[in-house]
Amino acid sequence: MSNDQIDAILEQVLARNPGEDEFHQAVREVFDSLPRVLAKRPEYTEASILQRLCEPERQIIFRVPWVDDNGRVQINRGFRVQFNSALGPYKGGLRFHPTVMLGTVKFLGFEQIFKNALTGMPIGGGKGGSDFDPKGKSDGEIMRFCQSFMTELSQHLGEYTDVPAGDIGVGGREIGYLFGQYKRMTNAYESGVLTGKGLTWGGSLVRTEATGYGTVFFARRMLELAGRSLDGAKVLVSGSGNVAIYAAEKVKEFGGLVVGASDSAGSIYDPEGIDLDLLRDIKERRRDRISAYADERLGAQYRDGRRVWSVADETPIDVALPCATQNEISESDAKSLLNGGVTAVAEGANMPTTPEAVRLFRDAGVLFAPGKAANAGGVATSALEMQQNASRDSWSFEYTEQRLSDIMDGIHERCAETAEEYGTPGDYVLGANIAGFTRVADAMLALGVI
Ligand SMILES: NC(=O)c1ccc[n+]([C@@H]2O[C@H](COP(=O)([O-])OP(=O)(O)OC[C@H]3O[C@@H](n4cnc5c(N)ncnc54)[C@H](O)[C@@H]3O)[C@@H](O)[C@H]2O)c1
């Protein structure tokens, strides 16, 4: 397939999905990596694999009515995009955040197809969520919302059909309420229908830590191959949620110093290294803003409205781990990081680096691990949770963490080898896109035109 033909398909995808900028960005980024593989494998073009990949198998949009603590009826919108099931049941998280719209869910679902393929496990790609904002809601409101959301969604799920998990705004508490309502709606204790469950009711050890830990396992391997290490490295982590906290924890275990973190209101700089117990207490228990950290920790600064990457304007930084949300490293943030001496970036979040920033990093020779490879540890451990549920078993922390570490090394090898095979050694973006794409495309070819 020529570059012109690829561009023409891209134009069709953009025209068919107007206004979905993040979805456009995700598709464009994958397409950019594909000319060489499409030239080598004409059967993908003959079977219209690209066009089929960009059209979700099913998209569900539904009303979510619920009653708030003042007795008022509230309405939110729910989504589930079942994108591609060539490799297994749809698998991907649910995001509850006021910015969620169809294009957000489609971008995340599209990324998820390739990420899940890269893990080597039998899982397809999907994603869901709602524009519901959990911030400032009571437990009762969260529960009523989750119950209403699941009342509709339950019709479309099943351990062999579609298996959601958490994402931004959906943690253990929400998964509990969602699972409870699913159980009630179906009169079945179908553990394998949701992952991220509590440890006493079917969850897997290490699932909570998996995305953050996995990102750091990937970064460690990438640095190792370049003759470097996390030991003694100065690191910035964005966000202070699930992925950020456990990424920071693993960096510390490997001898790195995490000096910055953030939330959507601002960032903190702590030259002595972030006190993770304090951060976790503020974020996980008190559900407070990150500014509280600087109030309670001597020597730490709070930077209202500023991204954590601005810390690199003041002190040298070796590694950046964006773990908050999409497009959170702009071109000027990338310049700050480069001026601060950053040599490696690993994406814990999905698509956190804008295309302009990715270009700057690649031109500067920064080791760059794209999210669909670096943050695949979460979904991989979800697949391990499904395995444990299917065999009515539960594994130890050490065993599960070792499996996660092996899976991340495997993903790293797959990306590195593919980049090498296609003549761009060290290009993890191209390696991840092609390795993920070929695994799904081959399965789609085998399954016929469906
Ligand atoms: N949880 C998982 O297993 C998992 C797996 C793969 C990828 N991811 C991705 O990782 C990212 C974080 O997810 P999470 O599960 O940690 O969610 P979370 O809700 O636990 O945490 C999100 C964090 O990001 C911060 N944040 C949100 N919007 C922001 C903004 N505009 N600017 C700065 N900070 C902002 C929040 O304050 C919070 O600290 C998302 O991109 C998600 O899709 C999560």
Image (cartoon, rainbow, N blue to C red):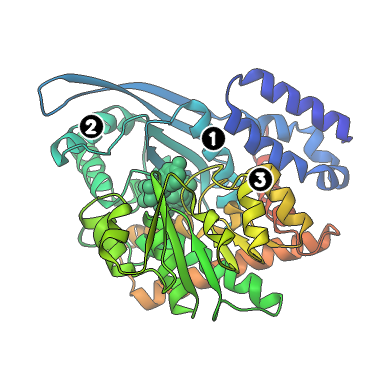
Distance between mark 3 and mark 1 Cα atoms: 30 Å
Position of 212 relative to 335 (above/below): below
Characterize the local packing of mark 1: few (<14), some (14-19) or many (20 or more) Cα atoms within 10 angstroms. Answer: many
Mark 3 lies on a secondary structure that is helix
Q: Quadrant of the C terminus?
A: top right
- Residue at image mark 3: 331
Going 25% across and 57% down the picture, which residue do you hit? 282
Label 2 or label 1, whichever comes before in sequence order:
1
| Amino acid beneath label 3 | Glu
Location of residue 249 by image quarter: bottom left
Task: Decide which of tag 2 and tag 3 comes sooner along the chain.
Answer: 2
Which picture quadrant has residue 268?
Answer: bottom left
Mark nearer the viewer, 3 or 1 = 3
Residue placed under numbered mark 1 in the picture: 83
Q: Quadrant of the N terminus?
A: top right
Q: Position of residue 232 (x, y in %)?
A: 54, 80
**In what element is the residue under mark 1?**
strand
Q: Relative to residue 25, is residue 41 depicted above or below?
A: below
* Amino acid at the residue labelled 1: Phe
Q: Residues within 10 Å of mark 3 (few under 14, many from 20)?
A: some
